Amino acid sequence: MRERWVIGNWKMNGTLPRNAALLDALKASAPTRAKLAVCVPSVYLAQASALLAGSAIAWGAQDVSANADGAYTGQISASMLQEFGAKFAIVGHSERRLFNAESNEDVAKKADAAAMVGIRPVICVGESLAERAEDRAEAVVCAQLAACAEVLAKFPALAILAYEPVWAIGTGKTATPAQAEAMHAFLRRELAKISAAAANVPILYGGSVKPSNAAELFAQPNIDGGLIGGASLVAADFVAIAAA
Ligand code: PEP
């Protein structure tokens, strides 16, 4: 049985008091079948670590350096994240691929750096609207996945994959359950080519997931939960999505 996760990506949002209220509300919510985690801006890792210690909710970062230490101003290493109890690091989010020019190879190095210290890399893949229109969606995500094949082969029990069509992120446009399932099934077949263990890597869907569409998406056989942006900032919505 594959793991089911609902992971919040706060992006660059939050203040100390708002985070505390959100985390307190999450802690007070009823347990769900899916496991919950929040990926917070790194300056708030200490706060997440303090407020979530002893709870069932895990926390993580939204990026990690590919380097272990040294002259990399502004970067944060996997072992630094580990010091704060981070369980996850999102790598290759489309906003980082776009705004920070991260290549597939950069993403693979980051995923490896995280997994090497036991942090679970949430590897994001997804095509743009133009790529989908040109019928290149599968080829694009396949190349993104192929770059991470070695990490997925080495760390199948740690890795998590997130299919996030770029055209659905923060736009209010969600892939239909059928569109999402088709890509997840394709990704599952590609994972199976890496190894039998990699075939069981959870594949989360991300892109404008809301309480109103979560149940239908998560009912698809190859969708193992969600990576949730905007809706993870509202405790009631995030919990409703997890309950779905
Ligand atoms: C995301 O940022 O990973 C995401 C899926 O965002 P949203 O849910 O807001 O589309």
Image: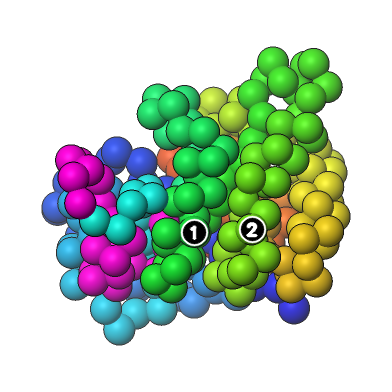
**Location of residue 86 in the rendering, given as x and y in whole percent from the top left corner:** 33, 67
Q: Is residue 19 left or right of residue 92?
A: left
- The disc placed on residue 74 is none
Which residue matches tag 1?
A: 112
Q: Nearer the viewer, residue 78 or 90?
A: 78
Q: As drawn, is 92 to the left or to the right of 150?
A: left
Q: Amino acid at mark 1?
A: Asp
Q: Is residue 86 magenta?
A: yes
In the rendered image, the quadrant that contains the C terminus is bottom right
Q: Residue 164: x and y, percent? A: 61, 40
| Placement of 201 over or under 66, stated as above or below | below
- Tell me the magenta residue range: 70-90
Residue at mark 2 to residue at mark 1: CA–CA distance: 9 Å
Q: Which image quarter holds the N terminus?
A: bottom right
Q: What residue is drawn where x is 68% and y is 46%?
A: 145
Please tell me which residue lies in front, 140 or 41.
140
Does residue 75 appear in this view? yes
Local packing at callout 2 (Cα closer than 10 Å; few below 14, some 14-19, many 20+) is some
Q: Residue 136 colored magenta? A: no
Question: Which numbered dot is residue 150?
Answer: 2
Q: Residue at x 69, y 15 (%)?
A: 130
Mark 1 packing: few (<14 Cα in 10 Å), some, or many (20+)? many
Mark 2, secondary structure of its residue:
helix
